[in-house]
Image: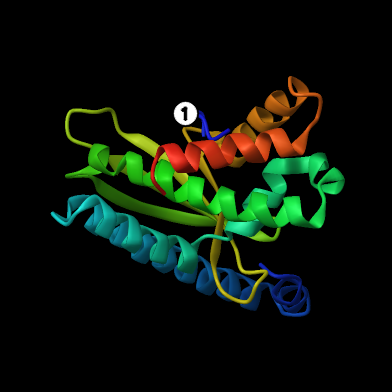
Amino acid sequence: MLTRRTVMTTIAFASCLMTSPGLIRCAWAQADERAVAFIKGTSDQLVAIANDEGSQQQKRHRLREVIDASVDVDDIAHFCLGRFWRIATPDQQADYLALFHDLLVTKIASHLGDYQGVRVIMGQARASGDTEIVITKVVRPENPVIQVEWVISIATGSPRIVDLLAEGTSLRLTQRADFASYLTHHQYNVQDLIDGMRHLVALNGS
C-alpha cells in the first residue's frame, strides 16, 4: 500500500558523445537549466495549491492536473509493482495503474495542509545516467529543513518526474518494497493488492 515511507534520452546522450568536450558541457548546462526550470515551475504550483483557500475537492482537482502534467505515474506504478507486473492479467494491470494514480493524488492531497507556508529553495541539477536530478531544500515553518532530490526523465519527449529522494531515501524504491512485502504476506495475489488499493481509494473519497 501507499504507506508513510511512501521523475537524458538515448538520442540526447548519443548526440553528446558526438560533440566536442566544450559542447558537451554546454549541452548538459542547457539540460540542467531546463530541469531546474521544470522543477521550479512544478514546485511553485504545488506550493500555490497548498496555500490556496479553496475547498479540498478543488485542491484535489488542481493537484491531479499538476501530477498529470509533471509525473510519469505509469512508469512509477510499473516499477513499484516490480516482478509482480508480469503475473498480473491485462485487466489487473489496468485496474492497478488507475488505482495507483488515485492513491498518489490522495496521498499528496492528505498532506497539503502540512505544507502551508512552505518554501522550496532551488539548487543545482546533475546528470545521473539517463535522468537529471534536481536538488532542492524544502523549508517548512517550525520544522527542520529537508533536502529533496527530484529525479527527472525525458524519455517520453518532455520532462517527467520519476522519483523523489527525501533525505537520500527513494520513495519509489520504498513503495516497491512495501508492495513486495504486502504481496509476500498475501500469497503473491495481485488481486488482493488491487482490492486493498480500491478500499483505500473509497475510504478517502478519491
Q: What is the x, y in percent for residue 33?
A: 45, 69
Q: Specify the quadrant of the image occupied by residue 152.
A: bottom right
Does the image show residue 18? Answer: yes
Q: Where 15 falls versus 194 (above or below)? A: below
Position above or below: 82 against 179:
below
Judge from the rendering whether residue 12 lies leftward or rightward of residue 140; answer left or right.
right
Quarter that holds the N terminus = top right
Question: Which image quadrant is residue 140 in?
Answer: top left
Which residue is at a point 80% across and 29% down the rendered structure image?
188
Give the residue at x 71% y 47%: 79
Q: Which residue is mark 1?
A: 4
**In the image, is 53 to the left or to the right of 48?**
left
Q: Position of residue 30 (x, y in %)?
A: 51, 74
Three-letter amino acid code of the residue under disc 1: Arg
Give the colour scheme shown: rainbow
Q: Is residue 138 above or below residue 158?
A: above
Residue 103: percent from the left, percent from the top?
Answer: 50, 45
- Tell me if 11 is positioned left or right of 119 in this view: right
